[in-house]
C-alpha cells in the first residue's frame, strides 16, 4: 500500500525517488519544488492536530 501511494505521489510530481546502487539497495524520496508548495497546508494540518489533541486531553 505504501509503495502504491509513493508511486502516485511520484507520478503527480510531488516527490522524486532516488535509488542508490548500494548493497543492500537504498531508496529515498524527497519533495520536488512543486511538492514543497504543500508545506503550508501540511503545517496547518499539524497545527490543527495539536489543537485537537489539546482539546481531547482537556476533556478527559
Image: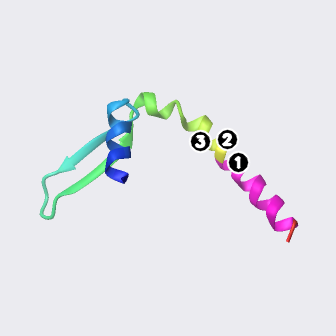
| Residue span colored magenta | 46-58
Residue 8 placement: quadrant? top left
Mark 2–mark 1 contact, CB under 8 Å? Answer: yes
Residue that numbered label 3 is attached to: 42
State whether the magenta stretch is mostly helix, strand or loop: helix
- What secondary structure is found at the residue carrying circle 3? helix
Residue 18 percent location from the top left of the image: 25, 45
Q: Is residue 23 left or right of residue 19?
A: left
Locate residue 54, reporting x and y percent.
Answer: 80, 61
What residue appears at the point 63 percent right and 43 percent down from the top-left corner?
Answer: 43
Residue 15 at x, y percent in the picture: 37, 38
Determine the residue located farthest toward the bottom in the rendered image: 60
Residue 39: image tag: none
Q: Name the residue carrying label 1.
A: 47
Q: What residue is disc 2 on?
A: 44
Q: Quadrant of the C terminus?
A: bottom right
Residue 45 x/y as whole percent: 65, 44
Mark 3 Cα shell of 10 Å, populated few (<14), some (14-19), many (≥20): few
The answer to whether the residues at label 1 and label 3 have Cβ atoms under 8 Å apart is: no
Q: Residue furthest front?
A: 1
> SS class of the residue under badge 2?
helix
Amino acid at each position: 500500500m505504501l509503495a502504491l501511494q509513493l508511486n502516485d505521489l511520484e507520478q503527480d510530481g510531488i516527490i522524486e525517488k532516488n535509488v542508490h546502487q548500494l548493497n543492500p539497495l537504498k531508496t529515498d524520496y524527497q519533495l520536488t519544488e512543486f511538492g514543497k508548495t504543500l508545506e503550508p497546508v501540511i503545517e496547518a494540518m499539524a497545527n490543527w492536530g495539536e489543537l485537537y489533541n489539546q482539546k481531547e486531553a482537556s476533556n478527559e
